[in-house]
């Protein structure tokens, strides 16, 4: 065998090894799930009793989400926002602990899907993780898959917490990450109220001690104490352009609005961050917060995706918010 042929084979072998190594690195970085830790689902127990007083619901103080619910039907608090009353009511679901009304409205040349949610207890608002893993890489699932795995009647994408390496994360009453970021968070408290605060103003443990049941970190905040704080000039390019959006809003104790806005099509343009805040204001939200959007914006209800994800199919994401059937 000539020296030149040996050299050719050595060079060819080098490039084969380089290709295999590079392929593995890319697969490991972007495809192969690894790392993280398993997070148990919370134990939610519900008992039905007859309560003769005017109080329909008693919420326990522990973090298992135990509730005691009267046999009387869950009633809608106040009046339906006029923007929904003039929209299309697509579906209604009630199981004694949750009343969910699904609407379609048009705003800013866009299709907007609204889940008007009333619950007996904030423990009915649950968080799901892809494969029940937090903190790893490439652990992603469709919102519909996470919903079906948790026997959910409703689900929506949330903050894609695993996309970031920092930021406070509390899920189902458990601290999953305590590293403070520059972002503002939204917290669902165990009394059914909602708080929006800069992460730099507190700690995960402090929020847990105050009763945080869920804490999401994405943003920006849209409405704080009935005042729109959304600003297309906030320094984030994604906030000033029309995009599909998902959002969470607080109307009153145990009364919430979950919103998905379709976008990036001729039929539905999507909205900027100020327009999203305007929509949440029309829904009577005193607090409102932007979840992950773009191709991630997905709403699931009663066995199907009700909006139209911009990529034509569901994007795989790291987490969701859901309500069990």
Image (spheres, grey):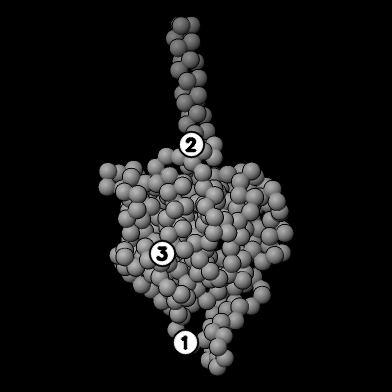
Q: Which of marks 1 and 2 is in front?
A: 2
Q: In which quarter of the image is the N terminus?
A: top left
Q: Which is nearer the eye, 304 or 232? A: 232
**Residue at numbered disc 1:** 72
Q: How many labels does the image show?
A: 3
Q: Name the residue under label 2.
A: 237
Element on which disc 2 rests: helix
Q: How far across and down, in percent of the image, does residue 123 sit? A: 56, 70
Residue 234 coordinates in the image, percent (x, y): 54, 40
Q: Which of marks 1 and 2 is nearer the N terminus?
A: 1
Q: Name the residue under label 3.
A: 115
Q: Residue at x 46, y 23 (%)?
A: 16
* Secondary structure of residue under mark 1: loop
Local SS, label 3: strand
The residue lying toward the viewer, choosing from 6 and 25, is 25
Q: Residue at x 51, y 47 (%)?
A: 230
Splitting the image into 4 quarters, where does residue 196 fall? bottom right
């Amino acid at each position: 065998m000539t020296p030149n042929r040996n050299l050719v084979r050595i060079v060819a072998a080098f490039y084969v090894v380089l290709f295999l190594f590079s392929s593995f690195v890319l697969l490991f970085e972007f495809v192969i799930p690894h790392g993280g830790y398993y997070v148990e689902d919370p134990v939610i127990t519900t008992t039905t009793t007859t309560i003769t007083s005017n109080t329909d619901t008693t919420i326990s103080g522990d973090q298992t989400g135990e509730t005691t619910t009267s046999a009387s039907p869950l009633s809608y608090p106040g009046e339906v926002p006029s923007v929904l009353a003039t929209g299309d009511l697509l579906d209604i679901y009630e199981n004694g602990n949750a009343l969910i009304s699904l609407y379609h409205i048009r705003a800013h040349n866009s299709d907007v899907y609204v889940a008007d949610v009333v619950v007996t207890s904030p423990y009915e608002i649950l968080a799901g993780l892809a494969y029940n893993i937090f903190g790893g890489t490439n652990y992603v699932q469709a919102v519909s898959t996470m919903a079906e795995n948790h026997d959910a009647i409703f689900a929506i994408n949330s903050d894609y917490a695993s996309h970031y390496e920092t930021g406070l994360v509390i899920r189902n009453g458990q601290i999953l990450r305590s590293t403070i970021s520059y972002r503002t968070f939204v917290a669902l408290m165990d009394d059914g109220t909602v708080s929006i605060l800069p992460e730099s103003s507190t700690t995960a443990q402090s929020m847990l001690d105050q009763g945080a049941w869920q804490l999401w970190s994405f943003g920006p905040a849209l409405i704080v104490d009935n005042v729109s704080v959304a600003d297309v000039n906030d320094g984030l390019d994604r906030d000033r352009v029309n995009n599909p959006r998902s959002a969470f809003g607080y109307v009153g104790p145990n009364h919430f609005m979950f919103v998905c806005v379709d976008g990036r099509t001729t039929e539905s343009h999507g909205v900027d961050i100020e327009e999203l805040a305007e929509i949440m204001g029309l829904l009577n939200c005193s607090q409102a917060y932007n979840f992950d959007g773009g191709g991630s914006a997905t709403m699931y209800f009663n066995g199907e995706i009700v909006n139209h994800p911009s990529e034509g199919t569901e994007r795989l994401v790291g987490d969701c918010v859901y309500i069990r059937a």
